[in-house]
Image: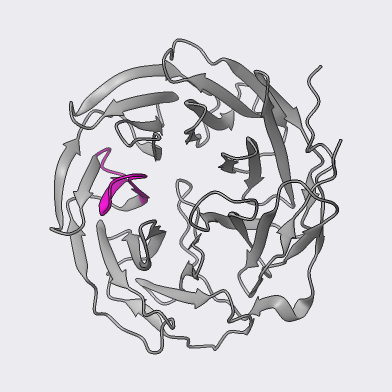
Amino acid sequence: MTISRFRHTQSVPARNDRHFINVNPSGAIWDCSNMIACNDRFLAVPWAQLGSTAVLRHTDYGKVASSPPILWGQEGPVIDVAFNPFDPTKLFTASEDGTIMGWDIPEEGLIQSTSDHIVHLQGHTKKVGIVNFHPSAMNVLASAGADMVVNVWDVNTGKAGEVLKCHTDQIMSLEWNLDGSLLCSTSKDKKVNIMDPRIGDIVASGSAHQGGKTQRCLWAKRQNLIVTVGFSKAQSRQVMLWDARDMASPVHTEDIDQFSSLILPFFDEDTNILYIGGRGDGIIRFLNWRMDDLCRALPTTLWRRIKGSACSLNGPWTHDSVRLRVFTRSRLVPFTPSKCFSHVDWRIANCRSMCTLPPLQTCPP
């Protein structure tokens, strides 16, 4: 049996004075998005006001103003947000009105509300709720919406260079591979797909989770593995690992638990740890990929229910490069773990408050 060196990972909450209090996010949630986004400078939250987004600096913890500066201008609720990985001051917001707007965030953060966007991407005929930046090419953005179309945008020109109309059912997730030559997706027809944007079609596909609820994917880029999360026929939550070179069947399938909430997955490329939380959960699970097997570590109990989550990287991969924030219904709670190995910075958030989290550490075996 393979034993994970991260099997004793655990966390304790940080002090209350590191919380963001009085956060008022949008009530519009789409199952296919993470609700919030962050990078090494800012945290973006779709706000309660229609078509608006609040952007907070990590140092702005404390009580948030009841009417903070916001980005506004979209005609429907914002349901997904993404920062440009090559420029931390550029934020893109996707809305139920079928459009994507790009914004320029001042270095000092938002001082006043503004509707002055830098680009307005219009190409979807229904709501768009998935936006994902290319990992190696600057200003290339992939988006997917309820119209079953994937657009690959040049955000400088505001035009879609590639339009992929190869799905026959609603797209539930979208992710690039390491060099950005391929995209993977999951769809409502219970399939996981690999697409080549240059061809404009699906080049490989597999039958994934057979449960009827939303399933999502991410690409473990260095391993060239696709991770999917969803539900089995028996409605237990599942994780599947796929070799991108052979999509006939998954290389590993793991049943997680019998919870009914939708899974929000994140993968740490340095430690090969898969973080799994779910909307409505009060717990975050750790799975470590080692020697062709998934090993479980101790789960972290949040005592509050998750509403959304986000993950960001501080530039190059370092021990403290991963930041994970989780939105719960009442507050953002920070956690400090025990002894050293992987430094992971958690941020837990809620409808009314948020807080920053010190680095996560784990005990050696």
* 353 sits to left or right of 257: left
The boundaries of the magenta stretch are 130-149
* 160 sits to left or right of 352: left
Picture coordinates of residue 105 (x, y %)? Answer: 36, 75
Q: Residue at x 41, y 15 (%)?
A: 245
What coloring was used for the rendering?
one colour
Residue 145 on the magenta span: yes
Number of labels in the image equals 0
Picture coordinates of residue 321 (x, y %)? Answer: 58, 54
Residue 330, image quadrant: bottom right
Report the quarter where the C terminus lies. Answer: top right
| Residue at the top extreme, as displayed | 248
Residue 231, image quadrant: top right
Q: Residue at x 53, y 24 (%)?
A: 209
Report the quarter where the N terminus lies. Answer: top right
Q: Is residue 339 above or below residue 147?
A: below
* 7 sits to left or right of 285: right
In the image, 218 versus 96, the foreground residue is 218
In the image, 362 versus 146, the foreground residue is 362
Q: Residue at x 52, y 54 (%)?
A: 313
Q: Is residue 180 above or below residue 306?
A: above
Residue 143 on the magenta span: yes
* 189 sits to left or right of 168: right
Picture coordinates of residue 275 (x, y %)? Answer: 65, 43
Picture coordinates of residue 302 (x, y %)? Answer: 77, 57
Q: Residue at x 50, y 37 (%)?
A: 214
Looking at the image, can residue 107 be seen? yes
Looking at the image, can residue 168 be seen? no
